[in-house]
Image (cartoon, grey):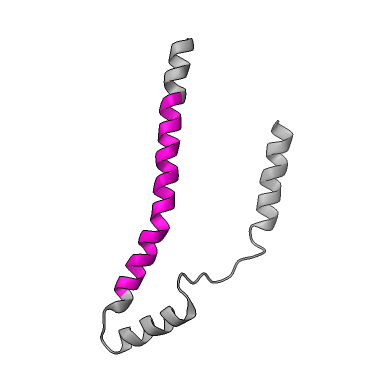
Amino acid sequence: MKKSILIFILFISVFAGTGIKTASAQCAMCTINAEQGVKNGNTQAKGINSGVLYLMAIPYLMIGALGVLWYKKYRTNATKTS
C-alpha cells in the first residue's frame, strides 16, 4: 500500500510540470471582446469574468458537498460499530 502511494506521488511530481501553459479561461473571441471593451470603457469584461468564475465554482461546491455527506455518513457508521 505504501509503495503504491509513493509511486503515485512520484509519478505526479515528475509529470506535473511538463504541461504547464498559460491558462486562458475564455475563448479567443470572448477574450478579444473583453479586452476591447475595457479599452473603450465598457464593463462587459467584469461580467464575463464573473460568469467564468461562477461556472468554475459550481463543480467544486458539489464535490465538496458530496464529501461532507460521505464524511458524516462514515462518521455515524463508525460510532454505531464502536
Compared with 8, 77 (above or below) is above
Residue 41 shown left or right of residue 19 in the figure: left
Q: Position of residue 47 (x, y in %)?
A: 30, 71
Write down the quadrant of residue 29 in the picture.
bottom left
Q: Residue furthest bottom?
A: 40
Residue 12 shown left or right of residue 77 in the figure: right
Q: Position of residue 36 (x, y in %)?
A: 36, 87
Q: Position of residue 44 (x, y in %)?
A: 29, 78
Comparing 73 with 7, the one in front is 73
What residue sits 42% from the left and 42% below the top?
Answer: 64
Q: Main secondary structure of the magenta part?
A: helix
What residue sits 30% from the left and 73% below the top?
Answer: 46
Is 52 one of the magenta-colored residues? yes
What residue sits 44% from the left and 12% below the top?
Answer: 80
Comparing 2 with 40, the one in front is 40
Task: Give the magenta range.
Answer: 46-73
Compared with 15, 2 (above or below) is above
Write down the quadrant of residue 68 in the picture.
top left
Q: Quadrant of the N terminus?
A: top right
What residue sits 36% from the left and 81% below the top?
Answer: 34
Q: Position of residue 62 (x, y in %)?
A: 41, 45
Is 14 one of the magenta-colored residues? no
Compared with 65, 28 (above or below) is below
Comparing 50 with 2, the one in front is 50
